[in-house]
Amino acid sequence: MTKPDTHKQSSKTRRPTCQNPACKKRFTTTVATAKYCSTKCGDAKRNSRKKVDPLEKALKSAFFYYLAGECLRANTLEILHGHTLETLCELHEVYKNNMKWNGYGGSNAYELSHIASVKGHDGVGMLFAENLVSAPKALNRAHGNKHYGFGKSISRLTLNPKHSVDKRWNTPSEVVQMVISYLGKDLVLAVIKTCKIKPAQRSQLVEWILAHYDPANPRHLIALGDLSQIHDLKTQQLKHVKNAMLDEEAGEYFASPAAPPAIVLCNELTRLSAYRPELEVYAYALDEALSTQAGDYSLFSKHHEQMLFDVLHGKGIAVMADTLEMIVGENTQRFVVQYGNGQHHVITNTEAQRYFIQDHKDQVIITSLAAFKASLGVETNTDNSAQVHDEIALHMLPMVVFDPWGNEVEQPPF
């Protein structure tokens, strides 16, 4: 059986123009639907794709809009001065983590807080990972422009007026383009590729809803009663609106919860240890302490939040060491206690005081954070620096011994 001819035939001869832009020649045909002079031209046209400038990804990405917004807040592009591919990728990672802590739009519990303030009197806090902390919003707002130390800033006296920006006459989209020019196209393209930056999903959803919204469509009105509210909606809410407009199963919208402050601040303590090595031992000890709470974190109080916030914002170990040790101790849910007669027992934080008061028959041996610090050979100096010597195996740690009344006594090395 022969396959029928799918082309519509015409009794008249036609002389159309080839629709391949690279050809545009007139050709003779009797096929009414013919568009191309040859198969080659047809394939060339179908295979041709519009080349999209990779910089378009930056122009529509949430990350670059964040950079632009921070430049507007600082009134200068120079908070980005000195960035490299590595430092911009570090900044992007901090930005992504903050979104994760906020449940990817389900909450706004955490903000990227500056260590050296953007509004500092003598300097302007720069937009680098080492100058940012993902911190509870309430603490950040209450902190204001205080600066305890560390971070990264640029002197106001050195700012070049030609790099000034102002929200009174510069729109965020304009500043995004200025940021790209300031950083350099090659660097921006490298960041887009390395960090796999894409246009913001939120902007794509907004564009789609604006293009398809019909106020005369009852389904659209149910999905979004007032189109002017679209710019106030979070990404997940916009997804819900789009699904409802398409009459697809969207389900009830539930915002993703924010991460617990204990996890966020402990993570930041670990991250900033890369810039302040003296924090590393405390970050390790706090992580271990939190792991004993089995995901409950009920021992982590608002007071602990404030103390860690202050440390992360530059308060030095010289004044905060005891506080950090206290935070670690108060967040340890279970202690392994060893008695002088060789017996051992596991007690919880809430039982500790009662247990030590009631049972005073034998000496009690526990390992303190101070002993752990000694095992690493960490020497804390007043200039906030730490020098780490060769590590000592954990099983060789010196132990702290208490008498029946809770007084520390000397113990020979094990």
Image (cartoon, rainbow, N blue to C red):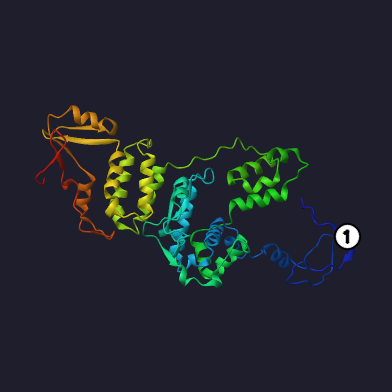
Q: Nearer the viewer, residue 388 or 352?
A: 352
* Residue 146 on image: x %, y %: 42, 55
Q: Residue at position x 26%, y 30% from top?
A: 351
The picture quadrant where one finds residue 39 is: bottom right
> Is residue 306 positioned above or below 114 on the image?
above
Is residue 125 shown to the viewer in this render?
no
Disc 1 crowd, CA 10 A, few/some/many (<14, 14-19, 20+): few
Number of numbered labels in the structure image: 1
Seen in the image, is 402 located left or right of residue 205?
left
Q: Residue at position x 39%, y 60% from top?
A: 151
Q: Residue at position x 73%, y 72% from top?
A: 22
Q: Nearer the viewer, residue 236 or 275?
A: 275
The three-letter code of the residue at mark 1 reads Ser
The picture quadrant where one finds residue 306 is: top left
Q: Secondary structure at mark 1?
A: strand
Q: Residue at position x 55%, y 61% from top?
A: 72
Seen in the image, is 176 located left or right of residue 379?
right
List the single residue furthest toward the left: 412
Q: Nearer the viewer, residue 265 or 18?
A: 265
- Quadrant into which the C terminus falls: top left
* Residue 389 on image: x %, y %: 21, 58
Seen in the image, is 11 located left or right of residue 123?
right
Residue on which the image places disc 1 = 10
Q: Nearer the viewer, residue 338 or 261?
A: 261
* Residue 182 on image: x %, y %: 53, 70
List the single residue furthest toward the front: 121
The picture quadrant where one finds residue 339 is: top left
